[in-house]
Image (cartoon, rainbow, N blue to C red):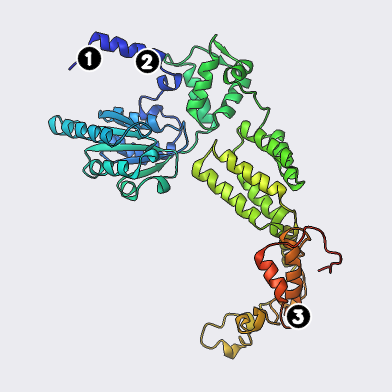
Amino acid sequence: MEPSLFDAAEQDAAARVAPLAVRMRPRTLDEVVGQQHLLGAGAPLRRLVEGDAPLSVILWGPPGTGKTTLAMTIARSTQRRFRELSAVTAGVKDVRQVVEDAKRALGETGAQTVLFVDEVHRFSKTQQDALLPSVENRWVTLVAATTENPFFSIISPLLSRSLLLTLQPLSDDDIRTVVERATSDPRGVDATVDDDAMEFLLRLAGGDARRALTALEAAAYDGTVTLDKLEQAVDRVAVRYDRDGDQHYDVISGFIKSIRGSDVDAALHYLARMIEAGEDPRFIARRLVVHASEDIGMADPSALQTAVAAASALELIGMPEARINLAQATIHLALAPKSNAVILAIDAAIDDVRRGLTGTVPPHLRDAHYEGSRKIGHTGYRYPHDVPGRVVAQQYAPDPVVGREYYSPGDLGVERVARERLAGLREVLRGHRTVVAEDVTQGFRSRTPVSTEPPATSKEH
């Protein structure tokens, strides 16, 4: 049935009151900003549209990167019917109803249907199973969107029947293009954006076009968007922060030095400043991982595990949720006992190598897993597991660095125990005793320091 004039007028009215982000949705693939790795000549989505193949896809990426837009554009560009379900509200009955309608349309008129499922990771296994026959038989072209890692949130049969495409956060240039288009297109807002407001919009967006357009619409009420109007509209102060200049380096320096100085509150302040200013959270995570070994090291070996876990969580769930993981890592590292023994050890070893103190590997340590190795002197290795304590006196280092001691544990945290353990190991390796004291060995294995106070007497290594 053809739409009536009343229906058309109703649609026009709805379009006029729709949010700016909806009004500015691209109508063709050529209007899509960003994601050129998926849209360039010969790229997967371009082939999908231009080849008109009913191939189902899963779009994985952060919010505001164009997942819904791409689904609608695929449907529009290929003249297919478009149906949308939200995994938040739809159930198995809704899925089956859409599929039955698609099968009917395909059988009666040959019309293909694009089924867009937003937040598909929220579907239960049963609901995802209900999609399988329609994907398998190509009754619909499924375009499923998720912000979570699909390998954890989507069932394997659905993954194997779909093309997985990863969307990237939009760059600052992409967001700028989106904003400029929204202020010049008849569908957008009749406003100009000054330079300070534009920079704030870019930081505020954090790669999310929808967030940028929502903020722009809230501030564009009288034709000029200024920084003050944006701050009032989004109820958020613009953090003065130049991601490529002094502020970038000063704030990250203050962040790391606050952790090193064990001031957890100052460290959290600088973390919050970077997050609010739109700093790349991956940069923050990388600095935490480095700091965990550089300034804590073996004083608390679990600090590195926490930092790496926070970086992994960031990749898995993204921002803003991952701010909690970054904060946890920051707190752990700030409270941990500190030691720079790890970086001093490796740098000392590297310095010796650069000065030519290398030498050959001792003969008894060289590879002996081939016939004839004994004939060239590759013998004499003593297997540590054959003796009590699992440590034997033999030379491991090349001659030029025999006796060099690179690692000098501190006297805090786990390194307090490591210090005692290392002293015993060196005595056995040099033949001064036959076995490491059992109490020291057990203490190190438990990683439980007996005290954080310095020992009364200590032997320098």
Task: Locate residue 330: give its quadrant.
Answer: top right
The amino acid type of the residue labelled 3 equals Arg
Residue pointed to by mark 2: 15
The tag on residue 430 is: 3
Residue pointed to by mark 1: 3
Q: Residue at x 68, y 27 (%)?
A: 240
Contact, mark 3 vs mark 1 (Cβ under 8 Å): no
Most foreground residue, 77 or 152: 152
The amino acid type of the residue labelled 2 equals Ala
Q: Of all residues shown, which one is farthest toward the bottom?
A: 375
Q: Is residue 140 left or right of 354 when viewed as pictured? A: left
Most foreground residue, 263 or 383: 263
Q: Which quadrant holds the N terminus?
A: top left
Q: Which quadrant holds the C terminus?
A: bottom right
How much space separates mark 1 and mark 2, taking CA atoms? Answer: 16 Å
Task: Locate residue 459: give its quadrant.
Answer: bottom right
